[in-house]
Amino acid sequence: MHPFCGIAVAASLVGALLSLACGGAASPLPTYPAAQQEAQTAAQEVLRQGSATSLGVALVTPDRLVWAESYGFADLESRQAATAATMFGIASVSKMFAPVLVMQLVEQGRVKLDEPLVSYVPSFRMADPRYTAITVRMLLNHASGLPGTTYRNYQPTGPYPSYGEELRATLAQQRLKADPGYMSVYCNDGFTLVEALVAAVTGKSYAETVQTAILNPLGMQHTAYTLAPFPQGSYAKAYGNGLPQPQEFASSLAAAGLYSTPTDLATFARIFLNGGTVGTVRILGSLSVDQMAIDQTKGRFSPVQPAYPSFGLGWDSVAEPGLQAVGIQGWAKNGGSLHYGAQLLVAPGAGLAVVVMGTNGAGYDPGAIAQRVLLRALIETGRIARFPAPVPPVAAPVATAPEGLLASLVGEFANHENLYQLRAEPDGSLTLLTFSFDAGHFEPSLAGLRYRSDGWFTADAAPLASLRVVEADGRQYLGMRGADGAKHYLLGFVKAQRVLPKAPLSRSWLDRLGLTWLVVNETPKSLIIPAAATPCFSLSTVPELPGLIATRPAGGLLSPNLLDPSGSASLARMMLVIPGNYGRDLNDLEVVVRGGEEWLRWGGWLHRPLASVLILPAGVSTPVIIGTEGHSEWRAVRAGPLPLRVSVSGASAWRCYDQGFNLLASGEASGQGTLPAGTGHGYLQLFGTPGASVSVAVP
């Protein structure tokens, strides 16, 4: 079978044929062919445009798997087609197993949702007295106030069992970004802490407990945590620039650590269609399923009340907007990682659920595919009359803006990943600009925005993209609206918060601008800061926002954070209060003095100053001792008139960079890197166990 055609598991049709063969008179159960065709059409679109190399889709009802199909190639080199047994990383859809497991413990009387976490994990600490108010519920509904995601060692190419312990050590040095319960903002660390909760209550690891309490009872034999490398051929490989990528591991099992198949995840979805049961197996009580689907954002701070996210316990949305637009209740959970994308979409009242999973999740929208398939199935059941048409690309009529409105909107707005500016033009329009940290200035991204009769600013050239500024709790926010998902509805959400200049930077902070620090405590198997990425961390400023600084993280995957250093010569504080998705993953920046040098701590990462890296002598072999903390050691090598071949032995891993921190060579144990002729220095990063001696020979 051609990979585009997929591998189908038509369980309902098989059951019907068996019934007829035995003389039964029952009518064949519906197979939803239009939904199946929509899945194939969507998969072909994605595969042809190169956004993914393989995808899996399944449709399920309360009593059965209707069909499950996989498309494309699990392995391009061997031309191995993806099949019903091919596993995909499901990224953050893994989070749905955490509330199911916790609700089981609640039903058993072993956990209370509104009990503080410290009641179960007394060792949990933060450098903020408010942490004792974080409850179990807040871990599951993103309302804990935790900074966000501890990305240090979060996504390596091998198991990293000490991640949970490291995360708690990091949090012990951090403060909250909001009072617990004040707002819900997406937070991976809350789910990682669920692992500690489960271990404390059950005496077993999180993965073992999920296995025995959920996976085994449901017969999910092709679903597994990344506790060890999977056999070749068992999972869909991800590709980058046409090259196979190493298997992706997620150190936070509860947040993102599962691989699964469409068939298995569809079985899990039936929990939410049957009030907690799958066949004769009861996983949860119906009241627990209902509790998971209560909108946890109601009553919490939010400048707007969006349908997405409208967090439940685990769910991203309990009022899924693509289904809500056609009058159907929906619950949704999305997942996206460096290599995979996934979606779980449930219409409980209609008795239908769709799962989608595929490689290279950043290149397409699995949520839109799930919407398309489920909408087709709803037509086939008669729940809706027709497939919804896309929102017409027509802007509301231009209206006269209230006096002084444009002038009041001008200024800068920030979120966890970008910085924006609104600029008023002489013709009465607005321009939205985005700051380029590489170029050091704002660049136009949407011009010709005019005030409209619906109160939004919209450009004729982009009639479905609108913005406005709203005020809440004494702060101003940039609200945005646009066509989303299958493009048959408009979704409004809070995009960014207004930021204002502060008092001029102190001499201490001014002296740090333009300096470089090097990360020392990320695993050499990292996908967040891989060998070929920059290991450098630096600070910059924005001309329009004097008194603030921006981090320039190592690795290049994470965007700069805007920080407020006023009031301290050694602490720059995270400053944004944005619910939903755009206030996530914030961190304070702390200056830490070690051996008389200024090191920087940001999130879980520690960075040493480049300026004090020792230079290795030429003509000898020098031992480099890994310190007691196990941090990587940095050494410099002077370039000369001829290329230098530097030899390393005794390291667990090593990297060799040129003066601009372009990777020249890397490896494990022993090896050689050649520094080109010239002036300046090359740099070595050496990894090993605490106390290990690494030998470096410079000719």
Image (cartoon, rainbow, N blue to C red):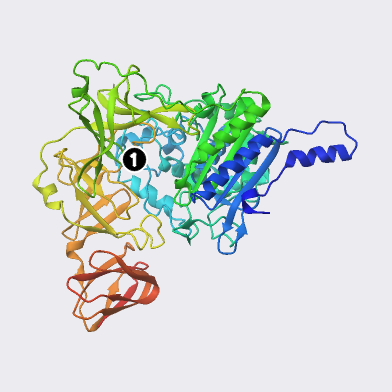
> Label 1 is placed on what type of residue?
Pro
Q: Quadrant of residue 115?
A: top left
Residue at disc 1, secondary structure: loop
100 and 547: which is toward the camera? 547
Q: How many marks?
A: 1
Q: Quadrant of residue 423?
A: top left
527 and 328: which is toward the camera? 328
What is the quadrant of the N terminus in the image?
A: bottom right
Please provide percent x and percent y for residue 672.
34, 77
In the image, is residue 691 above or below residue 75? below
78 and 270: which is toward the camera? 78
What is the quadrant of the C terminus in the image?
A: bottom left
Q: Who's the residue at 64% across and 31% down the image?
A: 377
Please provide percent x and percent y for residue 521.
33, 58
Q: From the viewer's perspective, is 555 left or right of 37? A: left
In the image, is residue 351 above or below residue 519? above
In the image, is residue 354 above or below residue 156? above
Neighbours of disc 1 within 10 Å: few (<14), some (14-19), many (20+):
many
Residue beneath disc 1? 147
Residue 204 visible to an observer of this rendering: no
